[in-house]
Image (cartoon, rainbow, N blue to C red):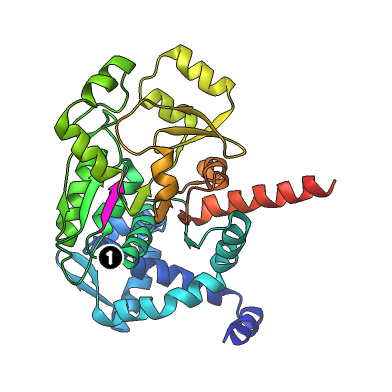
Amino acid sequence: MRQLIELQQQLVPELLDTMRKRYLILNQVMLAGTIGRRTLASELGMTERVLRAETDFLKEQGLLEIQTAGMLISDEGRTLLERLEPMYNSLFGLSELEEKIKTYFGLTQVIVVPGDSESSMQAKRELGKAAGQVLRASMKPDDVIAVTGGTTIAQVANQLTISTALKSIRFVPARGGLGESHDYQANTLASTMAKRTGGHYRLLHVPDHLGEEAFASLMQEPNIQELVEVIRSARIVVHGIGDAMVMARRRKLEQTTVDEIAAEGALAEAFGFYFDRSGAVVHKMQTIGLRLDDIVKTEVVIGVAGGKSKGEAIAAVMRSGYDDVLVTDEAAALEIVALIEQNGSNAQQ
């Protein structure tokens, strides 16, 4: 099959471009549920005229349904997407990116979705959908699943679906709240995931950043102690990855602390820990929740992050060796592979 398509590509160069375009249209409609043509054109970066021609064709093929409220994917379209996905990833080099990153960092699984989630909401939804599929495949009865906050993990929560309710599973926040939008806090996302899977959740109502005295005082509270024990028993952790300086400022750290983190060479932040280029922890927050010792013992750690600008930060966290699975996008994966190849060239010199 691959050889046939390569021959077709030589004879009909526009073949793969058309295939990719139609795949992305169907995929975006599936993720959106119901979507209007103007909104879809904007999200895919197409003109309405071009999109209209493509959606009319897909409707004629029975893959799309067009209603007054907007377009939605048909059962035939959904089935086609599922069958096309493995071939799509192979054709457009995503499988090769996955294998390179997996081998270099010694991960058990790497998933790369098309696009750049920094500039495309479609890619961000796809990132959430793929991570949700990984999480769903990893879940077992009686699991405790710890989740961090952030806009990317919010997409995981929104895209998470299961066919049968898992009532014995518990979702918990990995740590205290960040103080940002309620929609993206770990408490909110743990609650959303529980509701979408039929599981239970526990909430941790404490600030993300605590002084020594406040930390010691809160850890004396029996309710806090009991919840922290549950959080630290998590078998699965789902976390985002951020740029170190961006996260330090979002947490409203004192400027002297931000300067210290920068001086220590921090590039990335995950779980409240700051990592340098080599993956070493150079700074950690005083926070109630998961510790690095707990993460080492966790059976499945799933990192979810994308965007071209995050390539270096993602690579830094992967070098730390705490993660088992990475779900990222094409833009970040290309940056990560470029760093891997650069390191290989430097090592040979």
Identified at 22% across, 50% down, the residue is 171
Q: In which quarter of the image is the C terminus?
A: top right
Residue 316: image quadrant is top right
Rendered location of residue 308, percent (x, y): 52, 46
Looking at the rendered structure, the kind of residue marked 1 is Lys
Question: Position of 192 compared to 151: left or right?
Answer: left
Magenta span includes 232: no
Residue 182 seen in this snapshot: no
Range of magenta residues: 143-147
Position above or below: 119 against 65: above
Residue 276, quarter of picture: top right
Q: Which of 90 and 188 is in front in this view?
A: 188
Taking the view exactly as shown, the residue that stands out farthest to the top is 256
Name the side, left or right, on which 87 lies relative to 264. Answer: left
Q: In this view, does 198 lie to the left or right of 207?
A: left
Residue behind mark 1: 140
Q: Position of residue 175 (x, y in %)?
A: 30, 36
- The x, y position of residue 315, in whole percent, is 56, 46
| Vertical placement of residue 317 versus 156, above or below | above
